[in-house]
Image: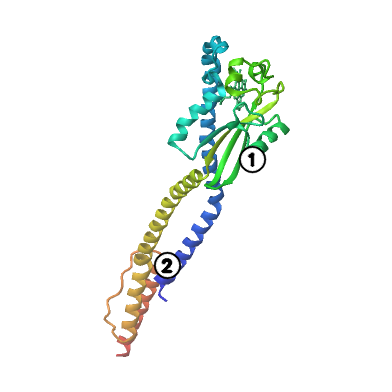
Amino acid sequence: MGLRAKFNLLMLAVAVIGVGLFALAADPLVDAVARQEVLQSSRIMMESAAGARKYTSEQIAPILKPQIGEHFYPQSVSAYAAKRNFDVIHSKFPDYMYREAALNPTNPQDRASDWEADIINGFRAHPEQSEMSLERQTATGPMLELARPLVNKPACMECHDTAADAPKSMLALYGSENGFGWKPGEIIGAQIVSVPMSASTVRAEQIRKLFLVPFLGFLVLLFVSMNVLLHFVVIRPMEKIAENAEAVSMGKMDTPEYQYRGRDQIGRLAGSFNRMQRSLVEAFRMLG
Ligand code: HEC
């Protein structure tokens, strides 16, 4: 095997190991960054829901309140507003979901499923926790769930305390069975944003490419420049010296000396070979 082949084989092995080590070291980091980004976009959605809630309770509810005696407008309810607001996002991104899950909901559609109830009970067990995120396997793939607790405040008691105290117009719409008896300060439910983890996988792939493409580019550059260096600094001068050595050893004493510019090891070899050739020529001349 020639020098070039040995050298390139070594470079290839180093490159393969390098890329492998890089992937090994970077993969968990890339996944974490991608997951963090997905979490961040869920947080923004959560804030948008919180915004719809706040806007409704501060600006819409006071306007519609005087009408509550005759007609109940669900539009004045924060939970309703947040859900309708998210419907717009859901229509554009069908995999993204928002829930106002409660253990004892006014609207049966909001009844917490098993895993949602686990989240609510988790918040009840840790009231100091203001946010929770978890990954969940679903039929459509893994989902990232971001949840925040919903606490029953004094202002909520007007409608969620007892059915007897709730507005009659509300009972006419929702009945008197559900969504009552919430205790003061109790965590009654959770806001839950669901984002498909596939978004994170796609993002991880993009980040990986972002790192890998310049890295591979660097390897190619290194490969080409090392080969050029090897060719001009080692292989070609060595071939010249070898050719001269072969010629002189075959008796061609008039072979022109190889002039190598450079003070490196090859230069030393070329210089000493030329001296040897001169001594040989001199010796032959004296013999002859
Ligand atoms: C004016 C009456 C009223 C007030 C005040 C009120 N709610 Fe509600 N709430 C409702 C109605 C009606 C629904 C059902 C809305 C729907 O159909 O989506 C509801 C729904 C909810 C839901 C979704 C789960 C469910 O029960 O269907 C949560 C969570 C909720 N309310 C929490 C609160 C909190 C927390 C407060 C106080 C900050 C509050 N509500 C104040 C009337 C009220």
Which label sits on residue 115?
Answer: 1
Q: For this view, does 54 lie left or right of residue 126?
A: left
Looking at the rendered structure, the number of numbered marks drawn on it comes to: 2
Relative to the observer, which residue lies in front, 40 or 270? Answer: 40
> In the rendering, at what x and y percent does residue 167 appear?
62, 15
Residue at x-position 58% and y-position 32%: 109
Nearest to viewer (mark 2 / mark 1) = 1
> In the rendering, at what x and y percent does residue 119 appear?
66, 36
Give how far apart the Cα atoms at labels 2 and 1 are. Answer: 56 Å
The amino acid on which the numbered mark 2 sits, given as a three-letter code, is Asn
Residue at x-position 45% and y-position 30%: 88
Q: How packed is label 2: few (under 14 Cα within 10 Å), some, or many (20 or more)?
A: some
Q: For this view, does 255 lie left or right of residue 98?
A: left
* Above-or-below relation of 229 to 193: below
Quadrant (top left, top right, bottom left, bottom right) of the C terminus? bottom left
Which label sits on residue 248?
Answer: none
